[in-house]
Amino acid sequence: MSLLRALHRRLLPADSGVGWTPYLWLVYLSFFGFRYFFVRPSAAEIALVVVTLAAFLALYFNGYWRSGWRVLPNIAGISLLGVAWAPFNYGASVFFIFAAAFAGRVGAPRRAAVIVALVVGTGLLVAAAWQPHPFYWVPMLLVGTLIGVVGIFDAGQRRRDAALRLSQEEVRQLAQVAERERISRDLHDLLGHTLSVITLKAELAARLVGRDPVRAEAEIRGVEQVSRAALAQVREAVAGMRTRGLAGELEHARVALKAAAVELASDGVPPSLPPAAEAALAMVLRESVTNVIRHAEARNCSVSFHAEPAAILLEVQDDGRGGGLVEGGGIAGMRSRLAAAGGRLEVSTGHGTRVRAWMPA
C-alpha cells in the first residue's frame, strides 16, 4: 500500500483535487485495444502499440501537473496519437476524447470551449479523410464533446474552490492579526498597572533603605507579592490563549479528520474542567488526532469522554495500522503535560492505536 501511495504521489500532484479518478478513466483505452480481439497484430504493430501507450501515459499524467497554455502540448500530443492511428485502428478516436478532457485545464470556459471544438473538429476531419467508420467518429463526437464540457465545468468548480480556500486563508490571517492585537491590548491592560505599582514601590524602597529599613523591607515584600500575582495572571492568560478548549478541539478534529477521509465518531460531552486541566486534555486530543492523520492510515477514529469516580477519561481510538509503539516527541509532550496537571497517559497499539488520558475530576 505504501508503494502504491508513493507511486501515486509521483504520478499526480497532491493538490490536484482529482484523487484516484485519473486511473479509472484509463479503462477507456480498451476501445483502442478492441480491434485486437478480432485481428491478430504483427510483431511490429505490437511494438508500435506499446510505444504509443507509453507516450500517451507520459502525456496523460504530465497533463495533471500543468494548467493554462502549458497544457496545450499535452492536448496536441494526445490528439496526434489519434491522428496517426486513425487509418489503422478506429478505436484510436479515444485519444481525441482524452485530449478534450484536458481542455478545462486551459483556463477560462470560453477559451476551453474553443479547445474542445478544435479537438473534436480535428477528429471529424481525420474521419472524413482516412477513417469514415462510424465506430471512429460517433463516439469521438458525442463522448468527446460531453467529456470536454464536463471537464470545463469541473475545472471551473476547482477554480472556485481554490478561490474560496484563498479567501478563507485571508480571513484566518486577518483573524490572527486581530487576535495578536487583542493579546497585545490584554497584556498591556494586565501588566501596565501592575508594573507601574512595582516601579513605584521599588523606588520608594530605595529611598527608604537608609532612613527607615523596616518600611523599606515592607515595600520590598509588597513588590514580591505584586510580582507573584502578576506572574500568575500572565500564566492564566497565556494558558487561555494556547487552547481552544476541549469542545473547540473536538470540532477542529472533526474538520481535520474529514479532510483526511477519516470518519470520526464521538461519545460523551467534553467535561468542564479547570483551565490548566482542560488545556492539558485538549493538547492530548490535538496531538492524538494529528498522529491519526499523519501516521495511522486509518479509516475510522473515535473520541470519547468518560466520567470515572475520581477522574475524567479521554480516549482516542483509531483502526489504523498500529504496530510497534515508538514514543516520539508528541507522546512525550502529552505525557509530561498531563503529569504536570496531575494526570496520566496510556498508549497501546494492536489493531490500531488507543490513547487514554486520565485527569483528576
Image (spheres, rainbow, N blue to C red):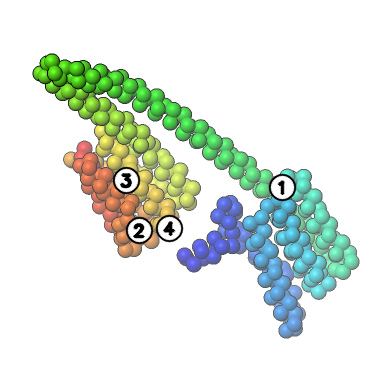
Residue occupied by mark 1: 107
Specify which label sits upstream in the sequence, 4 or 2: 4
Specify which label sits upstream in the sequence, 1 or 3: 1
Residue 201, given in percent of the width and then of the height, sits at 22, 19
> Dots 4 and 1: beta carbons under 8 Å?
no
Specify which label sits upstream in the sequence, 4 or 3: 3
**How far apart are labels 1 and 2 at the CA level?**
44 Å
| Residue 236 sits above or below residue 345 on the image | above
Q: What's the mark number on residue 297?
A: 4
**Residue 299 or 323: which is nearer the viewer?**
323
Q: Nearer the viewer, mark 4 or mark 1?
A: 1
Residue 62, given in percent of the width and then of the height, sits at 65, 61
**Residue neighbourhood size for the residue with mark 2, other residues' Cα within 10 Å, grouped as few (<14), some (14–19), many (≥20):** some
Residue occupied by mark 2: 352
**How far apart are labels 4 and 3 at the CA level?**
19 Å
**How far apart are labels 2 and 3 at the CA level?**
17 Å
Residue lying at the far front of the rendered structure: 210
Name the side, left or right, on which 256 lies relative to 99: left
Residue occupied by mark 3: 284
